[in-house]
Image (cartoon, grey):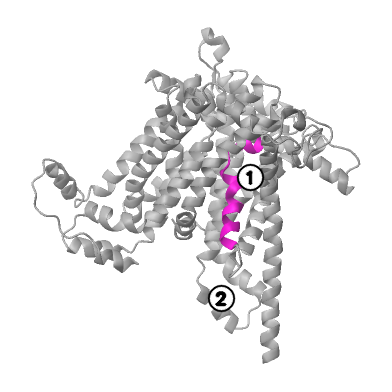
Amino acid sequence: MAQDTRASAPPPKAKTPFSWRQPLALIGALSETRYWAYLLLLPSLLLVSAVIIYPVLSGINLSFNQFNLLRIAQGMNFIGLQHYIELFEDPDFQIILKNTATWVIFGALSQFTLGLIAALALHRKNLKGGAIARVLMLLPWVIPSVVAGHMWALLLDSRLGVINDILVRLGVLSAYRAWFADPATAMPAVLLVDLWRGFPFFTLLLYAGLSSVPEELYEAAEVDGANPLQKFRAITIPMITPVVVAAIILRVISLMNSPDLMIVLTNGGPGLATYTLSLYAFQIAYDNFNFGAAAAVSVIMLVILMVFTVIYLRVSGVTKD
Amino acid sequence: MRRILTSHKAIQRLYDAVAYVIIAGLLVFVLGPLMWMGLTSLKREQDVVTADLQYIPLHPTLENYVTLWNRSGVTTMFRNSAVTTGLTVSLCLLAGTFAAYSISRYRFRGRGGLLTFYLLVRMFPVVLMLLPLYIMLRSIGLIDSLFGLALTYTTFLLPTSLLMLKGFFDAVPPDLEDAARIDGSTRIGALFRVVLPLARSGIAATGVLIAVSAWNEFLFALMLTTSESSRTWPVVLQLMVGEFQLPWGLLAAGGMISILPIIVFFSFAQRALVRGLLVGAVKG
């Protein structure tokens, strides 16, 4: 395929003097200089810096200040670490931290596990309907979280939910259950919804990872008499580790940072049962307009993510690039 | 020898059977909820809110879709989402292509730091920069504007697109470019005539992923738009809940409408997407 393109590459341009030819030639000449690598980086770097740098620095600064939109007359008052101290002295915050750990760890692990199983099954050769199954499997990941949230709210509804109906008919439950209103089942229920939404992401990346393992490695191992389990441990796992690490980091970031599902499904309740850091920060900012405290919670989230990423990259040993 | 071969075949067939069972089970898990949403969207409201559950709608109707479509501004919001998504994809691919090519082909000082910086950008919590971003966008007149929203999305999606595109460009052999340059092409000429055509399925895959993320984004859209004229689709769906007492039928219809473009898009881009991801996601 590569050679085709080279053969059909357009012939050298005829020398017709267009008016815009001058600047174009200039760019061409510029692309031969040693500044070219930097010039190419410039647009994206400018864009990202313009939109991100000021808000982030300003947000971090905000976390050391008393600032409430409802009491805007009082303006910004520097209070140092007071927001942080108040947070860590608040017993509720301990619970929220624990919830966040449950949410991120169980979320990432369950989604990774199911995603890996799906990817391994889909990766078997000559399966009929494999191509269609791969696309259908991606659907939950591409629909808006708001839609997914409401859909599952109806499925698990305490009066109208079809899942309750099925479970009662099967004799698993004796009566309908209010999954999102019961402190014991609220978190598992939201985790189930996110499992539905999140596992296809892992399937997609892990499937791509599995497909990139050279077939010869498996053939060589077979000649040496390796059984499937040995092949999996000696070839598959090391070969897909970089993809696994990248996928887990990306997923942990979005589990940590997006309160979408909680906003739609539980609003943190019942009690504090499904309160996570991202929802907490969102509500302090959006409902109470206490932007200083919200910024402090966000900074804590950012620090946790950075520490996790650094440690995870170290431990997994894929820090080459 | 023959016995070993047949038993080997039997084992393979057993694995295939296991794979089929797993895939079938997962498809029920994946599609069941979506099918229920489809069925609900065809029910009258009183048939949803009833004690005895109707698995098949007894009075199937398109009423919900008609009501939704006739509500003021629904078409505007759909258009808003489309415009924002289109702008975001264009900006991301344009800026992302140049940067990814540079990172893929050149070794320069600060290259590793740059990649770390982009990974870091992904980690910033939305709420942290919400107020400053709001103030900043308002001071340059980009609050409550689709362009402001697209600019914000671009910033957050650029790191992802950059990493994916870098993987695709890595997969294009540099020899081909060298050949083009020996034939008198400049570097940028070689980029447009050799690298981009070869990486087009990867670029398409990246575009689809950006489009899906931008189409679905909810938090920024909720915060950075204030008037009906610039609300996007997911925000409207969420705000509908506050307006009525959980209108299940309408919500389901809205859900079906919002995933329709994605399904159509996906069935077209499917081949490019899967092929592109095979090359890209791994090396990214």
In the rendered image, the vertical position of residue A120 relative to residue A37, given as above or below:
below
Q: Is residue A242 visible?
A: yes
Residue that badge 2 annotates: A218
- Within the magenta stretch, is there residue A140? yes
Please give the name of the residue rendered at 66% of the width and 49% of the height, measured from the top-left corner. Answer: B30
- Chain under numbered label 1: A
Left-right relation of B97 to A167? left
Q: Please tell me whether mark 2 or mark 1 is closer to you in this view.
A: 1
Span highlighted in magenta in the image: A130-149
Name the residue: 48% across, 60% down: B278
Residue A53 coordinates in the image, percent (x, y): 41, 31
Identify which amino acid the numbered label 1 is placed on. Answer: Arg
Q: In the rendered structure, find residue A14 and report the number of the disc placed on it.
A: none
Decide: is B10 above or below B223: below
| Helix, strand or loop status at disc 1 | helix
Report the side of B99 relative to A244 (left or right).
left
Q: Quadrant of the N terminus of chain A?
A: bottom left
Q: Residues within 10 Å of mark 1 (few under 14, many from 20)?
A: many
**Residue closer to the observer: B86 or A113:** B86
| Residue A44 x %, y % | 35, 40
Give the residue drawn at x 51%, y 14%: A76
Taking depth in this image into account, of B238 and B124 the one nearest to the observer is B238
- Residue A189 lies in what quarter of the image? top right
Badge 2 marks a residue whose secondary structure is helix
| Disc 1 target residue | A197
Q: Main secondary structure of the magenta part?
A: helix
